[in-house]
Image (cartoon, rainbow, N blue to C red):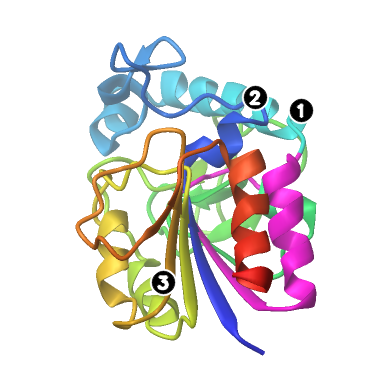
């Protein structure tokens, strides 16, 4: 079975009603990134950071997988689909995708603020101040803050190196180190990029589908079977 590696970004979740992490005004849901999504923000005001992600988590749990998520899950009937997502939501999993690697964490889990390898499934929508890990440290969202290492980058690069097909969906390829994953895809592998605004991909061999994910993924799948 041929393997297709899919790198998804905020654009695929936006069609489920989840806002992209940074709007045209530089804000995320009305907050400056520096105030809610950095290690310094956590040290300075953990209550605000916790409240911000609790709100985001509620939005994620209310959202539903869209046609793009569902189409990628159905594609597993014919391909070994490996999804690498920059998104912290669980919409790929809820759509039925079996192999999903979260580069930047998963908002439906918590993690120790002192021991990042300690993560826990989350029941409900909130992490409360005073909730501690097994080593006694405050629990925080299981997300990679801006400026923190991306521990799943190396496993993601290894997956990209095994691709028979590669697709970039709903991402501008401007967030590093995630954008560097394109460089690990073997030469000659067919590559797709799907977005209403095609990012500046250096490799001109990309098949460009300038559409939202919900329609663009269907066109890619048609091309995979009939192209």
**Place of residue 166 in the rendered image (x, y in percent of width and height, measured from the top left):** 46, 69
Mark 1 or mark 2, which is nearer the start of the sequence? 2
Q: Which residue is mark 1?
A: 62
Of all residues, the one furthest to the front in this rendering is 227
What secondary structure is found at the residue carrying circle 1? helix
**Place of residue 96 in the rendered image (x, y in percent of width and height, measured from the top left):** 79, 60
Q: Residue at x 73, y 67 (%)?
A: 75
Q: Is mark 2 in CB contact (under 8 Å) with mark 1?
A: yes
Q: Is mark 3 in CB contact (under 8 Å) with mark 1?
A: no
Q: Which residue is mark 2?
A: 17
- Quarter holding residue 147: top left
Dot 2: within a 10 Å radius of its alpha carbon, few (fewer than 14), some, or many (20 or more) residues? some
Q: Residue at x 76, y 28 (%)?
A: 62
Mark 2 or mark 3, which is nearer the start of the sequence? 2
Residue 156 marker: 3
Q: Residue at x 59, y 27 (%)?
A: 18
Q: Residue at x 41, y 71 (%)?
A: 156
Residue 13 seen in this snapshot: yes
Residue 137 seen in this snapshot: no
């Amino acid at each position: 079975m041929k393997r297709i590696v899919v790198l998804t970004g905020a654009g695929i979740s936006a069609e489920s009603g989840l806002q992209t992490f940074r709007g045209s005004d530089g804000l995320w849901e009305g907050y400056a990134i520096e105030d809610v999504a950095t290690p310094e923000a956590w040290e300075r005001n953990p209550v605000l950071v916790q409240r911000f992600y609790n709100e985001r988590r509620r939005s994620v749990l209310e959202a539903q997988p869209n046609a793009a998520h569902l189409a990628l899950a159905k594609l597993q009937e014919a391909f070994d689909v490996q999804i690498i997502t920059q998104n912290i939501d669980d919409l790929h999993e809820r759509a039925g995708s079996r192999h999903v690697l979260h580069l930047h964490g998963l908002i439906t889990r918590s993690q120790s603020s002192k021991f990042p390898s300690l993560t826990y499934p989350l029941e409900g929508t909130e992490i409360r101040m005073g909730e501690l890990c097994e080593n006694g440290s405050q629990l925080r969202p299981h997300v990679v803050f801006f400026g923190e290492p991306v521990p799943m980058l190396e496993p993601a690069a290894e997956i990209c190196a095994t691709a028979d097909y590669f697709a970039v969906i709903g991402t501008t390829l401007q967030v590093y180190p995630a954008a560097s994953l394109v460089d690990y895809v073997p030469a000659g592998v067919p590559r797709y990029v799907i977005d209403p605004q095609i990012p500046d991909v250096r490799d001109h061999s990309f098949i460009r589908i300038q559409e939202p994910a919900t329609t663009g993924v269907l066109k890619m799948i048609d091309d995979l079977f009939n192209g």
